[in-house]
Image (cartoon, grey):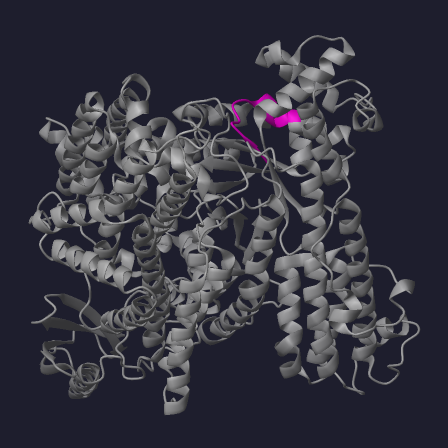
Amino acid sequence: MRFNVSLILVAATFHSASAFTFTVPSKPRASVRLETKFASHPNGVTSDTKLSKRASSGDDDDSAANVAKAATKLASSINAIADNPFGKDEAVAVAMSAPLSQAADIDAVNDAPLLADIDMLSDMLAEVVKKENPAVYDLYTTFRKLGMKRSANPDDPTPFEEMKKLAYDISPNDTLGVMKTFSIALNLVNAAEVHHRMRLVRKNEHADDTHHIGPLPMIEDSIRGTMEILLEEDEVSPDSIFERLISQKCEIVLTAHPTEVNRRTLILKYRNISELLAQLERPGLHPFERAEASNNLRGIIAAIWGSDEIRRIKPTVQKEAAGGCAVIESVLWDAVPSYLRKLDAQCRVTLGKKLPVDVAPIKFASWIGGDRDGNPNCTPAVTQEVLAYQKLRAAKMFLNDLNFLYSELAISSRFSPELEALAVTIENSDDELEKYRRVIGHLRRRLVRTVKDCEAKLQSLAKSPETLSAEAAFGALEGWEDVEPIMKTDDLMAPLKVIYESLVTTGFELVADGRVSDIIRRVAIFGLTLVPLDIREESTKHTLALDAITRHLGIGSYKEWDEASRLSWLQSELTSRRPLFRIRDVEQNLFDFDPDVVKTLMVFKVASEQEPESLGAYVISQAKSASDVLSVMLLQKQFGMEERLMRVVPLFETLDDLTGSPKQLETLFGTTSYMDAINRKQEVMVGYSDSAKDAGRLAACWAQYTAQETMAEVATKFGVELTFFHGKGGTVGRGGNPALYRAILSHPPNTINGRFRVTEQGEMIRQNFGSLEIAERSLDIYTAALLRERFTKHVEPKQKWRDQMQRVSEASCANYRYFVREDPRFVPYFRQATPELELGILNIGSRPAKRNPKGGVESLRAIPWTFAWAQTRMHLSAWLGVGAGLNSENEDDRATLREMYEEWPWFREIISLISMLLSKTDFSITKNYDELLVDPELMSLGDEVRTMLVETRQAVIDVSGSKDISGPHVQLMRASSMIRNPYVDSINVVQAELLKVLRAMPADDSSDLTPELKEIKKVRIDALLLSIKGIVQGMKNSG
């Protein structure tokens, strides 16, 4: 049994209050109230804590004493925080460890160390800038002071007007310096927040709550907290929890979607800063070590200042793929087994069961090198090169692991019969007595052969950056020429499991649970390719390929056939043994197909040559019909992949496609040849960003909900196991949710069931997997959320809620589409009021910003669409249409919406996300962009949009019942914005001025562009790029 201690922190200086819950063993209905007052002090914070106890009449003396004792100890801890605001072991447990951007306000106690870190890093940066360029230092500090004044009093227009005047007067070179300083400063804020997030987790881990033990934090969105809730509140049995845990599967798909604006070298430096901040908080740190860490921080910041932050060359697909591999090698390779060790220990402590060593509740996949949708640079040859590179990197990583394992397992007696039998099969080994080494040595030689084969493959495909041979990296291992390479995961997994079982059964279990377990877990999760590669292609590409084939065969134009004719022909060919063509004829293009058609077909040839485990899903973007899926099945069959089909995943990403998706599944599941091929398992991808771009946020969300709900019913009807693949990207702008745990729990009923696939893109990969601790925390949240969801009794929406959502969706969509599609002012306004046209020079991704280079806004990808509006602090793509949907003259409608917010988690999460983005909008800043950049005849549209913004803010506040109405600039404020806005406001003002000046300068090919003007233009473009980067770091959800 438990009781709660409510803790009220009244901060006289910091103007904030927080409530905490402290849990210890006791009888029910006993409570303690603590009130702690904090006051500022030159050397920190002082406090005064008062305690009062209330026990129920049923409590005995022991229970009351327990309450008083625990509460007194907690009060002592609170006072210790005041004495030591950077508190370490004395810290009080916190309830959650979300980023500051999710906090409602700055917490005077828990956030004090973060603010101190930011001040320290800012001072170090200021030292560097002042020494390098005093003028830039003065401008930076002036801008920042004005930003802080504006943040403190948003309704006072004076600071903003002074910022605008300062931006107008600044010289090109000083502009560049100031933008660079602000961009670095915001990156430092983010590095401090990364460390702070883990500081809060560690505080919770060190809390003195002896009732619960385990290596993972005792918070709701951790597996430890989730297990406790399931056991004690939901009364689920340990066996049920364990069975669901070991059967669930979450796959995180890394994509190269271009929202990561930082160069990789700088990302590593900012990671080092977070690590050094953690080092400075180590208990018992020697003064010399502290001084050394501080000097290292100064050195890194100086090196960042001296670096070129701008990508001068657009990255290739290969470089993007190498970046994805680097995340695995530098972080996830260690984070995954480390987390699984803790998960295993938590299972033993809480459930009394050992986690099987080869269980993989979290896996990874990648699109980088396989995503051809709208990217002409992702050719079949590039895909082949990326696959070979990934296999090479995996072989080298495992070879390194086995070298360490070989050194450790010098055991010369007590082997299992299975290990003895395996060792006998290995010839030409010097390890006669040490049979573990005999087996491991053979695996090493086979991996060297794998490395050699991959290097030869890469050299035949292209000039590879890999120059370090296997011998140079790992020492000469003789005899590798005489063994077969390891090409399949099981070739490595099977002998490792024999080693593991032998150690366990012969009394060396502790040895087995060390490095051997880690390697087995890496094999289970990363395999021999690091990550399986998805292939994505647009549906029309397959249509054009089949059209070329049918025309060549003289049977008509596939493209011109109706859906029934296409399905009839596809089903016939899927059951036919006759090939449509000889593959070599297509390779040599003897049919004179269009080069794009040949490229589409050659992707299937590349896929047919790979081990099945090297590949993941074949995703069809812009999928609209069942024939889109069957066409890919037929092309796989044509290239001999019948026995190792890639699973074919339709991506439904527009309002119409989502609405029609259940019908398409009905057609597919009614096709016998298709059902036989898929083994009654189907994956469907739901597009979030493109559907929102098509219909607006609310209409898209409702279409996603109802489509998933109905597709799940269709799958159940046909006995198909359905897995949804969520194309959220992680960022809020693309449909992601930083409150990941709650987001997963709020999904439609019966649509997850322990199977969850989701994309992580660009800067979100760094935010969630950029360091060891953060990566482990992210893995923990995903694992806990999927487990909790399996037992969650979802709220089924009432019929009146459904009716209301239909009304909201229709009104919202109509309003959104009117402005985006029908108002002739919108497209020119969008291109003038935002830096959309300038985003192309950022060089942050290998693919073009548009699927169709000649198209308008409709062909613009969802990322630059969202990115551009985020830059101007309008965030229009996130809320346009929302106000029209939520506002109603009917009181019953308004009451129903409030009821939905209170009782329906799915709806509440949608509104909360919109609220968070609305909190980042800024009326005056967007108006300043208009005044400087927009033609007079278009200004009226900007005024209308800002009026809608105010109405939308009010509508969201009315639905949520919030009382936080503090004026047009600071409604729905968040703590993150309070820290970042003084920086970002300044960047926005300067960026608007830069856009105005640059657009007025002569074009690059103009004779009016003199050498002097050309140099000035170059400096201003660099300053603009740094301003874009800075705003991205400040907003943290731009793409």
Residue 107 or 612: which is nearer the viewer?
Answer: 107
Query: For residue 380, what is the image quadrant?
Result: top right
Q: Is residue 157 left or right of residue 461?
A: left
Query: For residue 572, what is the image quadrant?
Result: top right
Q: Position of residue 802 (x, y in %)?
A: 28, 31
Q: Is residue 642 magenta?
A: no
In the image, residue 621 sits, relative to residue 777, either above or below, namely: above
Does residue 672 appear anywhere in the picture? no
Q: Position of residue 388 (x, y in %)?
A: 72, 50
Q: Is residue 624 magenta?
A: yes
In the image, residue 71 sits, relative to residue 1004, either above or below, namely: below
Say which residue appears at 84% left-offset and 28% top-offset.
584
Residue 103 or 177: which is nearer the viewer?
Answer: 177
In the image, residue 1014 sits, relative to residue 665, either above or below, namely: below
Say which residue appears at 44% left-offset and 33% top-offset.
1004
Does residue 46 appear anywhere in the picture? yes
Say which residue appears at 90% left-offset and 74% top-offset.
424
In the image, residue 390 sits, relative to residue 415, either above or below, namely: above
Say which residue appears at 56% left-offset and 33% top-offset.
373
Image quadrant containing the N terminus: bottom left
In magenta, the rendered stretch is: 619-631
Q: Position of residue 172 (x, y in %)?
A: 32, 48
Residue 2 or 897: which is nearer the viewer?
Answer: 897
Image quadrant containing the C terminus: top left
Q: Is residue 318 left or right of residue 553?
A: left
Q: Position of residue 150 (x, y in %)?
A: 13, 53
Q: Is residue 41 left or right of residue 587?
A: left
Residue 608 or 2: which is nearer the viewer?
Answer: 608
Total marks drawn?
0
